[in-house]
Image (tube, rainbow, N blue to C red):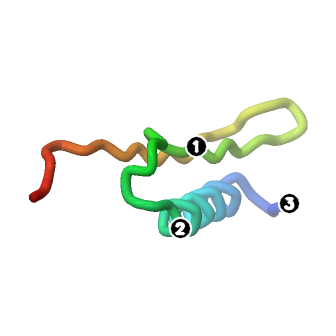
Amino acid sequence: MDLGSRRTAEIEAALSLADIAEQLEPFDGSDGLVVIVRDASGPVSRATFIRERVRQVN
């Protein structure tokens, strides 16, 4: 995907991460997700979603 600016790429990464996280089953064994934004030189930014169970719900 080719985006016009770094800010546009960061927004797209965050929106993509939200879409993916929404489709996950609750606590299905995944600790989190990362979307890495890259340009020709390498990584530019990273959007991270960390899922952590604080306490068990009855």
> Which of 53/17 is in front?
53
Disc 3: CA contacts within 10 A as few (<14), some (14-19) or many (>=20): few
From the top left corner, tell me how far across and down residue 10 is, in percent: 62, 55
Q: Nearer the viewer, mark 3 or mark 2?
A: 2
Q: Amino acid at mark 3?
A: Met
- Please name the residue that numbered disc 3 is placed on: 1
Which amino acid does the dot numbered 1 rest on?
Answer: Val
Tag 1's secondary structure?
Answer: strand
* In this view, the mark in front (1 or 3): 1
Kindly identify which residue carries mark 2.
Answer: 23
- Circles 3, 2 touching at the beta carbon (< 8 Å): no
Q: Quadrant of the C terminus?
A: bottom left
Cα separation, mark 3 vs mark 2, equals 22 Å
Looking at the image, is 37 positioned above or below residue 3? Answer: above
How packed mark 2 is, by other alpha carbons closer than 10 Å (few <14, some 14-19, many 20 or more), is few
- Quarter of the view holding residue 3: bottom right
Looking at the image, which residue is at 38% across and 51% down? 27
Of residues 45 and 35, the one nearer the viewer is 35
Residue 17, numbered circle: none
Residue plotted at (53% across, 67% down):
23
Task: Indicate the position of residue 35 as horizontal and vertical percent values.
Answer: 63, 47
Q: Amino acid at mark 2?
A: Gln
Q: Nearer the viewer, residue 48 or 51?
A: 51
User: Pointers 1 and 3 in contact (CB under 8 A)?
Assistant: no
Q: Which residue is mark 1?
A: 34
The span from disc 1 to disc 2 (Cα, nearest Å) is 15 Å
**Quarter assignment of residue 36:** top right
Q: Earlier in the sequence, mark 3 or mark 2?
A: 3
